[in-house]
């Protein structure tokens, strides 16, 4: 089981299905998912600051985090939302 599978099992589905009672639960799940992603992105932003460090391991972690954030930015900036 992956980390993604575990989180999905803990939080639940976030896609609306058109049934009022179920969609209320899914809206709450979406709020929980957004909160988690926000916290994780903040952690990645902090890690990205290390890309300017002289220590090789810190610089490497910083670069990976920075590149990931660039990929996220590019995806949200260029992809059409359905």
Image (cartoon, grey):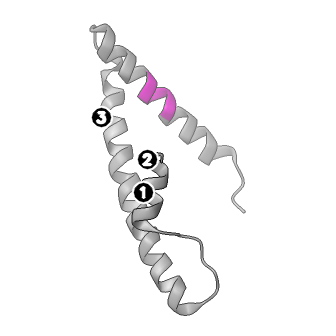
Q: Residue furthest bottom?
A: 20
Q: Secondary structure at mark 1?
A: helix
Highlighted magenta segment, given as a residue range? 64-68
Q: Is residue 49 above or below residue 5?
A: above
Q: Is residue 19 above or below residue 2?
A: below
Q: Nearer the viewer, mark 2 or mark 3?
A: 2
Query: Residue shown at 53%/83% (left/top)?
Result: 23
**Is label 2 in contact with label 3 (beta carbons under 8 Å)?**
no
Numbered circle sitting on residue 7: 1
Q: Kindly report the distance in space between the C-alpha atoms of the residues bearing marks 2 and 3.
A: 21 Å
Residue 13 percent location from the top left of the image: 52, 69
Majority secondary structure of the magenta segment?
helix
Q: In the image, 69: left or right of 15?
A: left
Q: Nearer the viewer, mark 3 or mark 1?
A: 1
- The foreground one among 3 and 25 is 3
Indicate yes or no whether the magenta region holds residue 60.
no
Q: In the image, 10: left or right of 19?
A: left
Query: Residue shown at 30%/22% (left/top)?
Result: 50
Numbered circle sitting on residue 46: 3
* Residue position for label 2: 3
For residue 44, which quarter of the picture?
A: top left
Query: Residue shown at 47%/45% (left/top)?
Result: 2
Q: Secondary structure at mark 3?
A: helix
N-terminal of the pair, mark 3 or mark 1, is 1
**Is label 2 in contact with label 1 (beta carbons under 8 Å)?**
yes
């Amino acid at each position: 089981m992956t980390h993604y599978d575990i989180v999905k099992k803990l939080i639940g589905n976030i896609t609306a299905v058109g049934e009022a009672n179920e969609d209320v639960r899914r809206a709450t799940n979406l709020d929980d998912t957004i909160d988690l992603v926000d916290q994780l992105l903040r952690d990645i932003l902090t890690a990205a600051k290390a890309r300017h460090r002289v220590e090789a391991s810190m610089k490497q972690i910083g670069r990976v985090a920075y590149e990931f954030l660039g990929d996220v930015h590019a995806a949200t900036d260029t992809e059409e939302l359905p």
